[in-house]
Every structure is written in structure tokens, then in C-alpha cells.
Image (cartoon, helix red, strand yellow):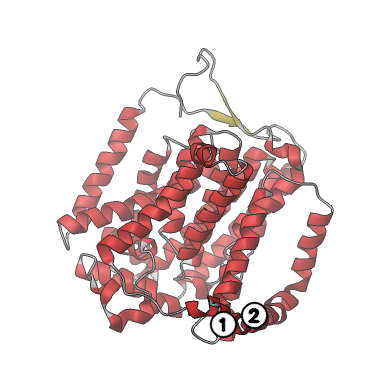
Amino acid sequence: MSFLSAVSVVLAGAVVTATVGYALARFFTGDLSPAERLAWSIATGFLVQSILFVIVVSILPGRARLPLVVIDIAIVAASFLARRGLLTPSLRLRGEGKVEGRPFVIALLVIAGAASLLFLVTALSEPMWAPDYLAMWGLKGKTIFETGFIPRRLFQDRALYWGRPDYPLLVPLSLATLASLSGGWNDQALALFFALCELATILGVWGFLARRISPLTGAAAAALVSVCFPLYRAVNAGHAEIPLALALVLVSCAFLDALGGSRSAVTRLLFASLLSAWIKPEGTLFVLLLAGVLWVRQRTRLVDTWKNGGWALVVPPVLHASLMFLLCRPIPQRDFDPTFLEPRRWAELLTRFGIVIARVLGSDVLPAWVPVLAIGLFFLFTRRGFADPLLAVFALQILAYLAAFSISSFDPIWKVEASFQRIVATLFPAFALVLGARVGGEESGQSVGTPVRPPGQRAGSQIG
């Protein structure tokens, strides 16, 4: 099969996946903008297809393609039959109908499109070769595809210890699913998965801020995300950080909508939390930190926190961790040395933490002093925004990274140089939501895009 043919069949599988995602996401995304719906469709599709793939290969090992297609057709048909005759609301976006700023919106979206196209071309220019892809994500995905099921040795074979048996499987399962739908494993063509994740991330940021603030703000944030080259570059095709960035954007958007009282946002929060927890442990940490922020905002009342969306943040990571432990029992990792937390080693821990901080400031922060200074000045001269509750999550997440480097069983300097820039860049697309929200100030979150009822439709009737 030629390269163009391989890309075409992988693209066809991705379209099928997004269609299945749309068939399900339309039940809880009716109050979102079209760009957001597309982003949620892509993400939901990969999540649902991976779950279906696990079920199918558990029953019919090695024969996933035809059953998957049949189930996909059934889901799409059932979705549209269930919602037949119901209207999808149009959204009144902030700034809609205004002439001023439209050329800038178009120019910024062109920049975002060009940057995403650049990543697509560079990602598809050669087979994925990143060390983490070869050692973890690609190894697991190809093993699952070639064997036709999920072998237990991926979790319990000590010869595969360096492949992180304890890591979640959504990325390998997504690659294996696309390979099954396309009829073969092609490392070069499957890089399309990561380009689609970038596209969905940009659409999510653009659509959310256009709905909550203005199209110009959304377009500016989308352009900013698209040129986050420490994340979106060819060497990172194959890394889980790119799909994780999408998950963090979606869970942040759903969280902010849920704070505004949206009921459908809680459902989105549930899906996005599962997506985050099933990609990387960092996603689980982010979701649990969001639950902590919600708990503080509810004045530490657990019952109120649970009722106002806390369950949607806590249940998915706990459920995923429990299933991994009960069904897979992966061999324990020795990447971190917990004895550093004992009082007798606190002095050594502080020394290591100081070394990590010095290395981060010297090798990552100092070379990027211009954008860091620009962000600092932006916060200094702008008012609070409705997305500011996310700032505590970002700060604690980065602090957790530094703490993890400090208790590493290996050289902490090596850990910083190998991964700090990449994992922090993963937070930037979600951080762009905070930057965009500050453009409109505190009041920007009070009036979100609201559905416009068609003439003759009564208030309170279900649409979507």
C-alpha cells in the first residue's frame, strides 16, 4: 500500500470515528458553538471507539474491523433515530453580526490553520521515531493490533518495564483502532491521529472563547495555541502530550461551563475527565486538582461539591485506576523513591529540589524570558477573568512536576532536561483559555452564548 493510500484509509477511519463521536456528543453539546461540537466529536469518538475496541477484541480476538464498523453504524443510526425531528439550537455568539474586527478574526484563523497544516505536513513527513513512541505508545499500540487483543504481558512482563506498564492505554488503543479500521499498521500514516488532536484542540479553544467572549478573542487564542511549537512539532508526533493537551482543554472548558450552572456541562465534564485520566497520569492529577478547586469554591462542603460536578471529576480517574489494578495488575514502577519523603532525608530532598528549580530557571525559563515577561505584563494590566480558577491548578500541576523530579530514582537533572519543557507545553493550550478570558474581564463569563429558540418553540422544550 502506498503512502497516500495509507493516509487515505487512516483518514477514512478517523472520519468514521468522529462521526460516531458526533452521534453521541450531540446529546450533550447542543448549547455549544459548531467549532466546539467538532472538537468534542473528535475526542468523544476516539474515547468511545477505544472502549468498543476493547470490548470487541475481548470477545472476538483478531477480528475487530467488521464488528467495529457494524457497531459504529448501529450507534449512528440509533442516535439520529432517537433525536429525529428535534431541532439543533443556533448560538448567539458574542460579537456576532459586528463588522469591526472581522478581518482580524479571519487573519488569525488563517494563521492557526497554516500552523496546524505545518504540523500535519511535518508529522507525516517520516515515520514516528520519538523515543517515548518507540518504547511505550507505539510498542503497545502495534502489539495490540498485531496480536488482535490486549496481552497481559504489556502489564506484567518485566522485560517491558521501560515501556511503563502502569500507564493508561487510550493512545495505544486509539492507534490500534485506527490501524484496524484502515486494515494495516503504518507508523507514518498513523501520525494523522496527533494532527487531528491538534486541530481539535485549536477548535475547542476558538469555539469556547468565541462563545464566552468574542470571535476575535477566540481567534487570537487559537492562533496562539497553534504556534506552540515546543508542543506541536514533528518530534512530538507519537507522544501522548498532544492528545493530553486536547483533553485538558476540553475538561477546562467543561469545568468553566459547569461553574456557570450548565447542566450539560457536567456530562461533558464526565467525558473529558475520563479522557484525561485514560491518557496519562498527569491527566488524572489535573482532574483531581480541578475537583480540589471546586471543593474550595463550595467552601469545603463535600456534599455541595459532589452535587455540583465533583462526582464527574472524581469518579472517572478512580474508576480507571481501579480497573487497571483489578484487571491488569501492572508491575510496580521504581521511577520514584518515596524514602525522600521520610524526615531523615528531608535535607537531601530540599537540596535536590533546589537543584531542580535552578535547572528549570536556567535551562527553560531564562531562554524564554521574553514570552514569560509578556505573560507577566499581561496579567499585571488585565482584570480578573472567569477562567482564573484554573491558575491554581496550573501552579499546583507544575509544582507537582518539580516535586516528582526531586524524588526521582534517577538523576533529577536528566528528568528535567528530558521532559520538563514538553510536559509544561502541554498545559499551554488550556492556559490560553485563561489569557483569553482576561481580555473580557470578570464580566465576560456572565453571559455565555445562549441557544436561540426557533419561532413557535416553547421554552423548556428539549433541543439539541
Is label 2 in a helix, a strand or a loop? helix
Looking at the rendered image, the quarter that the N terminus falls into is bottom left
Looking at the rendered image, the quarter that the C terminus falls into is top left
User: Relative to 410, does residue 138 appear above or below in the rendering?
Assistant: above
Q: Earlier in the sequence, mark 1 or mark 2?
A: 1
Q: Which residue is at the far front?
A: 344
Relative to the observer, which residue lies in front, 231 or 420?
420
Question: Which mark identifies residue 344?
Answer: 1
* Amino acid found under the numbered disc labelled 2: Leu
Relative to the observer, which residue lies in front, 368 or 307?
307
Relative to the observer, which residue lies in front, 415 or 180?
415
Q: Residues within 10 Å of mark 1 (few under 14, many from 20)?
A: few
**Residue 215 located left or right of residue 410:** right
User: What residue is drawn where x is 56% and y is 82%?
Assistant: 344
- How many numbered marks appear? 2
Percent coordinates x, y for residue 119 in the rendering = 54, 66
**Residue 299 located left or right of residue 130:** right
User: Relative to 362, does residue 155 appear above or below in the rendering?
Assistant: above
Percent coordinates x, y for residue 389 in the rendering = 66, 49
User: What residue is drawn where x is 48% and y is 48%?
Assistant: 313
Is label 1 in a helix, a strand or a loop? helix
Percent coordinates x, y for residue 280 in the rendering = 45, 64
Q: Between marks 1 and 2, how big is the CA–CA gap?
A: 12 Å
**Residue 434 located left or right of residue 422:** right
Can see residue 105?
Answer: no
Question: Which mark identifies residue 259?
Answer: none
Question: Which mark identifies residue 350?
Answer: 2
In which image quadrant can residue 127 be found?
Answer: bottom left
